[in-house]
């Protein structure tokens, strides 16, 4: 007997037929004698629709009350949790749905980006033991205890709910069922020759996720790493009847680096189009200027990522170029316009048609010249690089968004990640 968490994302529960297929996956594990907690997302498209309604409800104000936003967008998962519990009961499986406040899953007060503080795993374990009950938990949501308000964990947050539940019940495995059969060397929708990885190290998955691969929410990988949860990413579209219980199903295990025997220099390529570039032109090259620019941005809660400083065209002053999330672009320009007196720049330039392409691999720690190969290959294809950042196990390049696919595929081939053609 093992204790399992099974998480199903939006496309996996998109309609009643798919929910029934999910229930059959759950039944297979229950019939094998395992204790199961299921975590579900909203049906695909629902959370986007709920966000759209919140935006449409505002006529006068710029921002909604985050507590009410969470009250609205948490509802999608409630529907799926109830429907899956009904479907399981219809298959004669004892199942009960749980919303974040019911279990509870306690979180911080940071609405729309709350962090999980505690999950009541003891109650789930008691019900496994005493009632052989499957827990169907609404992902993405929790409760801020002091204010008794519903919170949500940020987009894609059901992954984090699943890993947190797995840690709380000391699950043997946390299965992330999704619409691809594992973690690939790059997004298989953009790179047809991407390869599925059998294993990926937590640290690499963390970089892939934070640099744009949305297959796992970043926070879920962090939690998995801290609590040593064995996370296995696999497809929900397989028919449960076809799964051979004696063989490992196709998928990707996210695990410690030591478990990976054959380590490549580069493991994967991620990209993100949610970036915007801002250049602050002709600022004085003297101490305090960077602080005058970046402190007000930090105070406005705007995350600055890549930063490059060049000599200005006039040779006397300096230009500072950096990136911010595209969603914060206009706010960042407003903040900088207000700081103009303190900074003393000539003008602001910006662009939203940019993309960040990142190359990730633990092997980079011990190999020099990995990034240089990329510069060369992209130059041959006339892809201009606007900014570069590097760290121990990754480097990122900012390019024109129009070249994203070309750059990702070029780098994918360059580092030997392409699947052999059959
Ligand atoms: P879910 O709704 O199940 O949470 P998501 O849409 O959040 O699923 O994540 C799965 C998607 O992540 C895939 O459909 C795929 O397009 C995308 N993706 C991006 N990068 C990768 C990668 N390296 N490996 C696998 N999938 C990736
Ligand atoms: N439904 C939420 C979202 O779309 C959470 C999730 O699916 O993980 O972001
Ligand atoms: Mg997701």
Image (cartoon, rainbow, N blue to C red):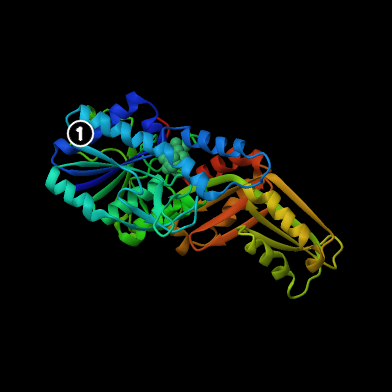
* Residue 419 visible in the displayed image: no
**Dot 1: what SS?**
helix
Q: In the depicted view, which residue is nearer to us: 257 or 14?
A: 14
Pick out the residue farthest to the bottom: 287
Q: Is mark 1 within 8 Å of ligand 1?
A: no
* Residue 18 visible in the displayed image: yes
Where, quadrant-wise, is the C terminus in this rendering? top left
Q: In the depicted view, which residue is nearer to us: 151 or 219?
A: 151
Does residue 214 lie above or below 244 as drawn?
Answer: below
- Residue for point 23% across, 46% down: 4
Does residue 13 lie above or below 384 as drawn?
Answer: above
- Residue for point 59% across, 56% down: 372
Pick out the residue farthest to the front: 147
Q: How many marks?
A: 1
Q: In the depicted view, which residue is nearer to us: 73 or 233?
A: 73
List the residue tagged with mark 1.
Answer: 27
| For residue 134, side relative to residue 377 (left or right) | left
Whole-percent x and y of residue 22?
A: 29, 32
Pick out the residue farthest to the right: 314
Q: In the depicted view, which residue is nearer to us: 220 or 405?
A: 220
Whole-percent x and y of residue 285?
A: 78, 71
- Residue for point 54% across, 40% down: 409
Whole-percent x and y of residue 179?
A: 39, 34
| For residue 10, side relative to residue 57 (left or right) | left
Whole-percent x and y of residue 242?
A: 23, 28
- Within 10 Å of disc 1 (Cα), the crowding (few <14, some 14-19, many 20+) is many
């Amino acid at each position: 007997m093992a204790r399992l968490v099974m998480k199903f994302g939006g496309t996996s529960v998109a309609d009643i037929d798919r929910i029934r297929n999910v229930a059959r996956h759950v039944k297979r594990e229950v019939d094998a004698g395992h204790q199961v907690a299921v975590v579900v997302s909203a049906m695909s498209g629902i959370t986007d629709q709920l966000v759209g309604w919140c935006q449409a409800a505002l006529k006068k104000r710029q921002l909604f009350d985050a507590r009410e936003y969470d009250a609205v967008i948490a509802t999608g998962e409630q529907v799926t949790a109830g429907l899956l519990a009904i479907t399981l009961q219809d298959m004669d499986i004892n199942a009960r749905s749980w919303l974040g406040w019911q279990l509870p899953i306690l979180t911080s007060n940071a609405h729309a980006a709350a962090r999980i503080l505690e999950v009541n795993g003891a109650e789930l374990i008691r019900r496994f033991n005493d009632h052989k009950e499957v827990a169907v938990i609404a992902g993405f949501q929790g409760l801020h205890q002091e204010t008794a308000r519903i919170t949500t964990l940020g987009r894609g947050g059901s992954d984090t709910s699943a890993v947190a539940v797995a840690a709380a019940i000391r699950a043997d495995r946390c299965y992330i069922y999704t619409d691809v059969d594992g973690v690939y060397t790059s997004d298989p929708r953009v790179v047809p020759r991407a390869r599925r990885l059998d294993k990926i190290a937590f640290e690499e998955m963390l970089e892939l996720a934070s640099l744009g691969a949305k297959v796992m929410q970043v926070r879920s990988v962090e939690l998995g790493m801290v609590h040593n949860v064995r996370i296995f990413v696999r497809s929900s579209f397989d028919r449960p009847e076809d799964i051979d219980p004696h063989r490992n199903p196709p998928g990707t295990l996210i695990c410690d680096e030591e478990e990976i025997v054959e380590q490549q220099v580069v493991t994967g390529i991620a990209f993100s189009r949610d970036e915007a570039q801002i250049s602050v032109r002709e600022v004085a090259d003297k101490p305090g200027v960077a602080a005058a620019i970046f402190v007000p941005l930090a105070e406005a809660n705007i995350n600055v990522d890549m930063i490059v400083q060049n000599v200005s065209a006039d040779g006397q002053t300096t230009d500072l170029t950096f990136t911010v999330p595209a969603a914060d672009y206009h706010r960042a320009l407003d903040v900088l316009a207000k700081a103009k007196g303190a900074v003393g720049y000539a003008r602001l330039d910006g662009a939203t048609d940019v993309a960040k392409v990142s190359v990730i691999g633990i092997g980079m720690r011990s190999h020099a010249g990995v990034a240089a190969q990329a510069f060369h290959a992209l130059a041959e294809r006339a892809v201009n690089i606007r900014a570069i950042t590097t760290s121990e196990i990754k480097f990122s390049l900012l390019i024109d968004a129009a070249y994203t696919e070309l750059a990702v595929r070029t780098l994918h081939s360059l580092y030997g990640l392409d699947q052999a053609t059959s």
